[in-house]
Amino acid sequence: MSALARAAISGVGMSDIGRNTNRPAILHLAEAADRALERAGLTRADIDGIATYPGKAENSPGMSPLGTGEVRNALGLQTRWHSAVPDGPAQMAPIMVAAMAVMTGQARHVLCFRALTESSSQTAGRRASIAGAGKAQIGGWMSWLASVGALSASNWAGWMAQRYFHEFGMTREHLGMVATGERQFAMMNPMAVMQKPLTMEDYLGARMISTPLCLFDCDVPIDGAAVVIVSAADAARDCRLPPIRIEAMGSALRSQETWDQRADLTTMGSHDSAADMWSRTDIKPHEIDVLGLYDGFSIFVPMWLEAMGLCGHGEAKDFIAEGNIGPGGRYPVNTGGGQMSGGRLHGFGLLHEVCLQLWGQAGERQLKDPKVGACGMGGGFIAGSMLLRRD
Amino acid sequence: MLPLPELTPENTAFWTGGEHGELRIAMCEDCAHAIHPPQLLCPKCHSQRVTPRAADGTGTIYTFTVNHQPWIPGMDVPFVLAVVDVEGAPGVRVTSRLYGAEPDAVRIGQRVRVGFEASGDVWIPVWHASEGETA
């Protein structure tokens, strides 16, 4: 057993997510927390740690309306340890620091959360997820993008996709397979926001956002929250469900904090972090049964497949075309519909789904007895990778 | 209106070089490493002797995207954003708007030359297509 397997996931929960819910973030959060606690067989009194990414943030409307303080207050939590991690291995950072916290005895059960109200915020006339929007001046890595007119991550992902297409002959149809496959999964998941069928014809006819990415290559802003409870392995044994062990995780970064300077833009931080993860376990890529891979944009999925070692560099287009990642595939990815059809819960939704699959709780889309799950969060220069296995 | 970069000791030479028509890239005086985004320290040899130097102002498109979505009020679309390998500064890319080429005609490998747009107290480098040239 790896040292990390002393940390486990004991419960996950997601609120009823939606678009334009106009429901306060804290109510989404409380619903997600109660569902996670119920699943784990724990109560609020058992929670002695709390962690989130990135913490309360005002830089983009609805991107992160809640910090640890508000959640502690609202849920009446007494904690021995708390942390908000804006600077870490992408959206996975709070899960990772929580694993370290339970392994070092700082806490027994850590409530990790992510809440977003980007959909309602956009309806109120403020566009979410725009670098430096509404500001006269901007600093940091975003300044190199926003100041020249690259305001949206779809631009940054778009030029990565363009280079990938150029080098490896990927076409829009390949990305369309990712998008339509996720929609097929979403239609088996009542929690997913997009429930109408999406055909390849629909996909190819959609309006462009930033070439070669169209509307259906982008994830969907929503209102909602997700909670993952990370527990010390011995404490998790007393919970309702078999613990999901955190077998290994990887956080390595080998390029600069930019979206344009990495020497090979057909790879991402994902490649660094996943290699780091594999260096810490005896499990091999072919043993993976289910994956949650960050799909803020469709192009991230083939990059993550390659990063995770499921196929070689440049081979993801064929891997996808062979039907590996959609319904019925050998390596199903984002079986809840992902962020492109399920809604953008910033990675937490993807991990939530992997855990449901490992516990056999994924309803109509349940895979046959999966035991090993892999999750990769982040795009561009930030990434976190995690390998999970059911006891 | 796009947000303008906050000027710092690291980036001022880059964002104001356009006043003199120069694309200024931070170069290490000791190991000749080109550093972008600019820093006060060379990450390769740890030298503090880093100086902005005028590059010759040409480059090659490494990749690009055509933005079709008006993200803020008044944004004219479509427009091209080009990620450009800067001539004479190995490893450095400068990303900006590309002018002088139809969006459908832009190609990876296309040669471009720099220009500048004054805005507030900075000069934003932009790229212009160099006709008929491919690397």
Image (cartoon, coloured by chain):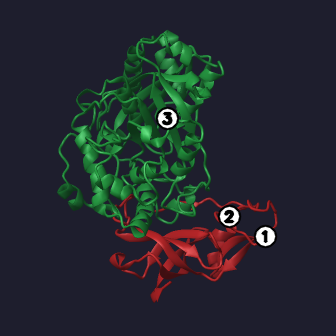
Q: In the rendered image, which residue does mark 2 sit on?
A: B38
Q: Position of residue A65 (x, y in %)?
A: 46, 34
Secondary structure at numbered mark 2 = loop
Q: Chain of mark 1?
A: B
Mark 1 residue crowding within 10 angstroms, few (<14) / some (14–19) / many (20+) = some
Q: Is residue A172 left or right of residue B97?
A: left
Secondary structure at numbered mark 3 = strand
Residue B29 in view (yes/no): yes
Q: CA distance from mark 1 to mark 2?
A: 15 Å
Q: Chain of mark 2?
A: B
What kind of residue is marked 1? Cys
Q: Chain of mark 3?
A: A
**Residue A62 placement: quadrant:** top left
Residue A75 or residue A15, whichever sits in front: A15
Q: Position of residue A2 (x, y in %)?
A: 59, 28
**Residue B42 placement: quadrant:** bottom right
Q: Position of residue A136 (x, y in %)?
A: 53, 57
Residue A219 or residue B20, whichever sits in front: A219
- Is mark 3 in CB contact (under 8 Å) with mark 1? no
In the figure, the shade used to draw chain B is red
- Is mark 2 in CB contact (under 8 Å) with mark 3? no
What residue appears at the point 17 percent right and 45 percent down from the top-left corner? A197
In the figure, the shade used to draw chain A is green
Task: Say yes or no: labels 3 and 1 on the same chain.
Answer: no
Q: Position of residue A169 (x, y in %)?
A: 36, 67
Secondary structure at numbered mark 1 = loop
Q: Which mark is residue B31?
A: 1
Q: Which mark is residue A344?
A: none
What kind of residue is marked 2? Pro
Task: Say yes or no: labels 1 and 2 on the same chain.
Answer: yes
Q: Which mark is residue A387?
A: 3
